[in-house]
Amino acid sequence: MTTHHARGRVGVLLPRDLPVRDLLRYARRAEDSGFDELWVVEDLGWRGGIAQAATVLAATGRITVGIGILPAGARNVAFAAMELATLAQLHPGRVIAGVGHGMPQWMRAAGAWPASPVTLIREYATALRALLRGEAGPADGRYVRCAGLVLTELPEQAPPVVLGVRGPKSQAVAGEVADGLLLAEPAAPGYIAASIKHLGREGMEVVVYDVAAVDQDGAAAVDRVRPGLSAIGEPDWAAHLEPLPFAEEFRAHRAASADGAEFARTMPADWVRALSVTGTPAEARAAIADRHAAGATSVVLAPVGPDPLLALDALALALPGAGT
């Protein structure tokens, strides 16, 4: 059985645009390569998180599978709890559930953006964790109504519920009502440390995503990872950059760039290295270690490159012990 609170884990993201014919091969290769975790995403219009998680859990034997993230506004909490409890029953100790607000534009497009996202996430996480522990649903709230409901089928071990949230208020809520945080990319050490302060509690899960590319030619890896940073100059990512020493120059660079592609292509290499896990295997390994040292319990690498399977193989060279 996997122990979720072991320190220093390294995971890999299953790309949302991975061709379906490669999905199981990618999952099995991630496990065989020694990654501790495989994380699936649920972006609007792509693939469903529960379906991906169930499939890769059944196709592998050891690796922990994280779902990052299930948008709270999109799923009734009682039925979400049933899905997650079933996964955790069938695959004990191998499931981590990420829940978040979802991207506002996606949630509005789906008619599921609440007037108060922070209230929803608080009520949702509280109810979800209670149901997964076998407790009765809490008193009805503004959004979540499952008072008194009890699940019949329960796992021996409730899966951890981490909140994929960016803002200080939502991160403080995670410290109160969840098992930890899931930080989207970029998760530089300064952002990790600032987020942990917002949690207000020690000993919690802190899973972090970062775009990643590894090559024996470190400069080639830096260039390869750049397209993965094209979106991070947009307003939704502001919280990730505020703790960093070059935040003001970063904003000016984005304002001077025609679009995200140009912004990423012309970004100073030092910024690219700070905002991703990239370079030679040793350099990438050091970047992972820096994130663990800042408080991350799991560093999840999002591969960037034209061939996801080759990118996965290259990222495995940065795993602890791979260079020995």
Image: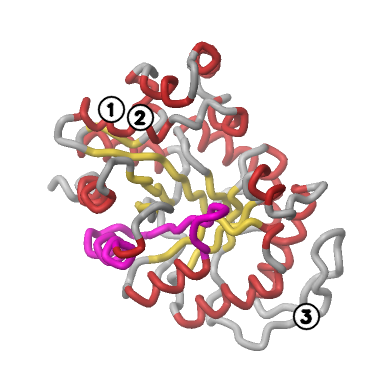
Three-letter amino acid code at disc 3?
Leu
Question: What distance separates the C-alpha of mark 2 from that of mark 1?
Answer: 5 Å
Q: CA distance from mark 2 to mark 3?
A: 48 Å
Residue marked by disc 2? 226
Q: Is residue 196 left or right of residue 301?
A: right
The secondary element bearing badge 2 is classed as: helix
- In-front residue for pair 225/22: 22
Q: Residue furthest bottom?
A: 152
- Of mark 2 and mark 3, the one earlier in the sequence is 3
Q: Which of pointers 3 and 1 lies earlier in the amino acid sequence?
A: 3
**Residue 6, image x, y percentages:** 41, 59
The residue tagged 1 is 223
**Measured from the top left, where is residue 140 in percent x and y?**
86, 68
Give the amino acid type for the residue marked by disc 2 in the picture: Arg
Front one among 39 and 104? 104
User: Callout 1: few (<14), some (14-19), or many (20+) C-alpha neighbours within 10 Å?
Assistant: some
Q: CA distance from mark 3 to mark 1?
A: 52 Å
Q: Which residue is mark 3?
A: 149
Q: Is residue 317 left or right of residue 277?
A: left
Q: Are marks 2 and 1 in contact (CB under 8 Å)?
A: yes
Vertical arrangement, residue 258 with respect to residue 46, above or below: above
Label 2 Cα neighbours within 10 Å, binned few <14 / some 14-19 / many ≥20: many
Q: What is the magenta range?
A: 22-49
Q: Secondary structure at mark 3?
A: loop
Residue 209, above or below 59: above
Q: Observer-nearest residue: 160 or 52?
A: 52
Instruction: Give the quarter of the figure containing the N terminus.
Output: bottom left
Nearer mark to the viewer, of 2 and 3: 2
